[in-house]
Structures are given as structure tokens and as C-alpha cells.
Image (tube, helix red, strand yellow):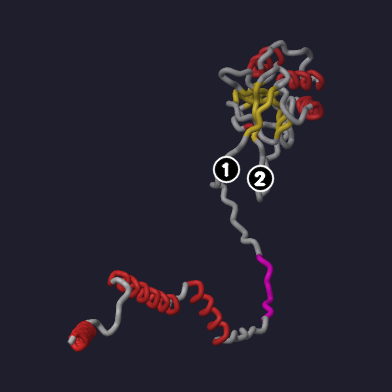
Amino acid sequence: MRRPLHFALGTTSLLVISAAAAHAQALAPSTLHLTSPERETKKDIVQVFTKDSAQAVTKERSPEQKTKKDIVRATTKEPVRPIAKEPVRAFAIEPVRPIAKPYSSETTQSVTHYSYKTPQGKKESIPVITQYYPQQIVYPLAKIDRHLDGKLMQAATIAQERAHAHSRSMCWHYVKEALLASGVIDSRPKSELAKEAAQDLVTNYGFKKLSVTDPFAAPVGSVLVYGANRAAGHVEIRTRDGFVSDFCSKTPSPRPLLGVYAKL
């Protein structure tokens, strides 16, 4: 009796076990997912990123690569065309002729002066000539008056021979020496200032004042005396082509003329 009972219990337990296993298999999923959902999401993100970035890298190029490729295409596609050279034409070159400008006396230019000291320590200045006149300036020649003492012309010649190139501020001294050497006067004038020469010559040596107001109109050998307010003045003898004292000049002194004197 025990054997059939054990057999029946064993068979029943097997059936129960097999039925439970079949039910468990029906409830179980077809595939097993060993990884967690978070890991799957990260893996998907990595796959998408790597695919998109790879496509972006392959599609996009740097500006330098584009430029280089464009340069290569431009050099290979468009051949350089040779420039046709025109034949050189020979032209006759005429010399440039200067335009002659008419001289105008109205043009004014600044005049520079050279300042210097005389041996006596006096400061003087003379104009510096930087240009020349296109037309020669001709000053009138002095006339010879036969009514004057002939020794006056000799005095003018002596003064010219002794004169210097520039003034030494000794005009009255040189005129005295010339008049004395020529014999026009027999003694040396005692006046010191040049502007006092007129009174000295008229009072002591018989000179007369001529009715001449233009220095260029003074006769050869006449003595011209110039005044000055705060200076010694000036005195000179008229020559054939200018004026002479301790220096020669083509033009008279710019000082005010006191008078023209001569001995008859």
C-alpha cells in the first residue's frame, strides 16, 4: 500500500512543478535586459552625437581649406591669357621754352641788410643784393660847368683815387684832404662834423651855394652836404658818373640834402 501512495504523491508533485514552470515561462519576457534604462539612454545619446558630429565634420570645411581649393580651381579652370603688347610709338620731344615774364617795377621784394661795426665802433648796415635788374639802370652823367674853379674837377679825381669800396665813416676827412691836395683850399678846415662843412666852406674858403636841389644835377667837382638830426651828416663830391667821399657810389646819399656848394 505504501509504494502506490508514494508513487502517486511523486507524480502529483511533478505535475505541480511542471505546471508552475510553464506558467513562469509564459509570464517571463522573451529577452533579458541586463543593463539599466539610464545606461541605455546615455548610449543612445553618445551614438547620436557621434553620428551627427561625424557628418558635420565631413560636411563642413575650414575657410582656409575652402580658399585653397578655390584658388586651385581658379588656377586650373581659367588659363592666363597673354596681354597683347602695343608697338611703342616714337614721339618727337620738343625742348621746353621758358616763358618770358615782363619786368614790372611794381614788384616789391624784401631787402635784407648786412650789419657791421666801423673801426670807431659805430653800427651800420648796407642792403644785400640778391637779384639783378633785367634792364640796366643808367644814371645821368654830371655836367661840367666852366664857370666853376677847374681845381674842383681835380679834387674829384683825387678823391676817387683815394676812396675805398665801403664807407669808413670818414667822409668829411677824405673830402678835406682832396680839396687841400687839389689846391682849391689853402688850409685844412677845422670843423669836425660833416653837416658843418657847408658853413665852414662858405665862411672861410669862398664857396657859394648853387641853386641845385637834385644831386644828379650837381656839376662835376661840386661839394654836396647832407644833414642829420642825431648824426654827423654826410659830405661828398660829385664825379662824372657818381659821388665820392671816403668811398665811391653811383647814387647820392639818402639823407636830406642841405645844399650844393662850389667855388667860382
**Residue at the (51%, 75%) spot, across then down:** 65
The type of residue carrying mark 1 is Gln
Which quarter of the figure has residue 25? bottom left
Membership of 93 in magenta stretch: yes
Q: In the image, is 161 to the left or to the right of 125? A: right
Which of these two is toward me, 229 or 97? 97
Residue 34, numbered circle: none
Image: magenta residue range: 89-96
Horizontal and vertical percent position of residue 231: 61, 18
Q: In this rendering, is residue 49 above or below 190?
A: below
Q: In this rendering, is residue 41 above or below 241?
A: below
Callout 2 touching callout 1 (CB < 8 Å): yes
Name the residue beneath numbered marker 1.
109
Q: Quadrant of the C terminus?
A: top right
Name the residue beneath numbered marker 2.
131
Horizontal and vertical percent position of residue 165: 76, 31
Q: Quadrant of the N terminus?
A: bottom left
Which of these two is toward me, 28 or 149? 28
The disc, 2 or 1, on the residue closer to the chain's N-terminal end is 1
**Residue at the (59%, 52%) spot, across then down:** 103
The type of residue carrying mark 2 is Gln
Which of these two is toward me, 186 or 24? 24
